Amino acid sequence: MVDFSDVLSSTANLQVQAHWEPIADATYNLHQLTQEQFDRLKARWPETVNMEWEQALELFNPKPAYPLRNYSQTDFQVFLPPSTANVGDVWELDSEKILPFFRQFHPGATTEITVSSHRTPKSDGAKACLRAISPNYAEIVLRIHAQFMLDAASVRLLPGQFAGRLVLNRTEGVVVEFSLALPSRNSNVDVNAFRAADVAFIPRMELSTLSRGLSTHEITWETAITEEETRKKLAIAFYRFAEIEWTPIEDTVELAKRTNRPIHALVLFGTLDDESC
């Protein structure tokens, strides 16, 4: 068991860089509206939309508010357990205290997720898991849900999730490595605007520390679980159905034949285990 209370004791600052690439692909290309399409969408909105077409296109493809930002070592204490933890333990993070990191992307970042068009907030939260420890180091894996209100009433960006890791030098009381990124897959974010919705792909949206000269692959861990096991623990902490062991369709068909039982099939658009469609 490792005690993480006040482990980050160094007074040194740490620079974090932000990368936010434009939307590369989308189902309905809401990010590439023509003037005519934009005018039609504006007309559907019940309130007056004080925005021009060019402004809307900029909102759909924002850049980081702070491409490079300094943080103190104690700022990262928010990702650590409040006291002690064993490898494999999962704990809840304080979503409000995490917001300064997400606001390096955009000041409209929030951890209160708006459900559908009813604007009913629900917190999908933030969790962490201790993946590995050694006498000098510890690695923590993160999963955080957040959304970005890009405009007061019109444009909302909902990433599927942010996955991250934090490596600490426990002896020196410093962060060795930190990253928090939108998983790169063909649909990883929802775009909502003017009562329209789109499923889109952002190639890179990431916070990461500048290199400190240490390769974390060189660390010999004393106790550890795999990255896959860690992500599974975090997924189950968010969604109980993640405990289900899925069977490949080929095996399911063979099982149905042997047992003479029907197959109940559900066809899904998107993923079950995050906030993107």
Image: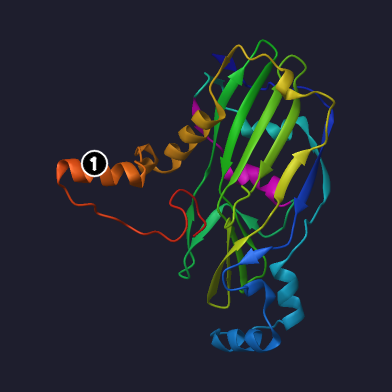
Q: Secondary structure at mark 1?
A: helix
The residue lying toward the viewer, choosing from 33 and 140, is: 33
Q: Is residue 77 magenta?
A: no
Q: Is residue 260 left or right of residue 221?
A: left
x 66%, y 45%: residue: 181
Query: Which class describes the residues within 10 Å of circle 1: few (<14), some (14-19), or many (20+)?
Result: some
The residue lying toward the viewer, choosing from 193 and 182, is: 182
- Kind of residue at badge 1: Leu
Considering only vertical position in the picture, is 233 above or below 2? Answer: below
Q: Is residue 98 magenta?
A: yes
When asked about the image quadrant of residue 81, the answer is: top right
**Any part of residue 254 in sight:** yes
Q: Is residue 117 left or right of residue 266?
A: right
The residue lying toward the viewer, choosing from 114 and 60, is: 60
Residue 231 position, x and y percent, is 52, 35
Residue 142 position, x and y percent, is 59, 36
Considering only vertical position in the picture, is 89 above or below 108? Answer: above
Q: Mark 1 highlights which residue?
A: 255
**Any part of residue 100 in sight:** no
Q: Tell me which segment is drawn in magenta.
A: 89-103
Q: Is residue 128 left or right of residue 138?
A: left
Residue 73 position, x and y percent, is 76, 30
Residue 103 position, x and y percent, is 71, 52
x 58%, y 89%: residue: 43
